[in-house]
Image (spheres, rainbow, N blue to C red):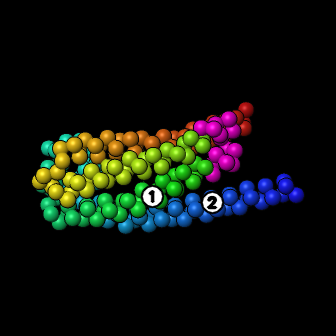
Amino acid sequence: MGVFLQESKDYSETKILALITIISIVLTVIFFLLMRPIESELTAQTLFGVIDLEFAWNAEQIDNIFTAWGDEFILKEINAVILDFGFLMVYSLSLAGITLILTKSGVFKSWTTFGYYFTLFPFFAAGFDAVENINLLLMLSSPSSFPSFAPLVASICATIKFGLIIATILFWVIGLVYSAIKRIL
């Protein structure tokens, strides 16, 4: 009886994990589609997009971007950054959910312990994304007198954020390739 209860508990946890992951993936796509037109308009009209803003590194480059954007696009980017706070919550759940599902499935074999650690990476990425967004909003809301630290902090956070996301996805790919090779051999 105890084994049956444990198996049914594991099954329901797996179903809940899968459901949360699927919902977060759908919401990630929706947020992406909501933000994409703003990015497309920015890059089409000014050649500067949000990635340029995230990786500006210094006040001089921020000034170049803001000059190209003007007040209208700065306001649109403020809206996009506000949307990004929702996006970072759902993309982190998506990436963590996928990592946890792959880890719990046993796909990674001897890498299972690493998988549980990598499940945390998307949440750390979201934390850095939030700090990045706060600094972007500091700059966007006061384009002519933003704090001098904001471009550097935003760029450092963006670098770490993307590094953690890329590391998570590389873990999936390397883990899946490793598992496939182990099965063949």
Q: Taking 13 as reference, is 64 left or right?
A: left
Q: Residues within 10 Å of mark 2 (few under 14, many from 20)?
A: some
**Mark sitting earlier along the chain (1/2):** 2
Q: Amino acid at mark 2?
A: Ala
| Mark 2 element type | helix
Q: Which mark is drawn over residue 89?
A: 1
| Residue 84 rendering spot, x and y as whole percentages | 36, 59
Viewport quadrant of the N terminus? bottom right
Occupied quadrant, residue 77: bottom left
In the image, what residue occupies the spot 48% across and 49% down? 123
Quadrant of the image containing the C terminus = top right
Determine which quarter of the picture holds residue 149: top left
Residue 103 drawn in magenta:
yes
**How many numbered marks have been drawn onto this rendered protein structure?**
2
Task: Report whether residue 169 is seen.
Answer: no
- Residue 124 in percent (x, y) is at 45, 46
Residue name at image x 56 percent, y 41 percent: 117
Residue that mark 2 sits on = 18
- Tag 1's secondary structure? helix
Q: Is residue 76 above or below residue 184?
A: below
Residue that appears at 32% across and 49% down: 132
Give neighbour class at mark 1: few <14, some 14-19, many 20+ (Cα, 10 Å). some
Determine whether 141 is above or below 104 in the image: below
What are the residue bounds of the magenta stretch? 101-114
Expressed as whole percent of the image width and height from the top left, the position of residue 82 reads: 32, 62
Cα distance between the residues tagged 1 and 2: 17 Å
Front one among 23 and 179: 23
Q: Is 136 covered by the magenta stretch?
A: no
Asked whether residue 83 appears in the rendered view, the answer is yes
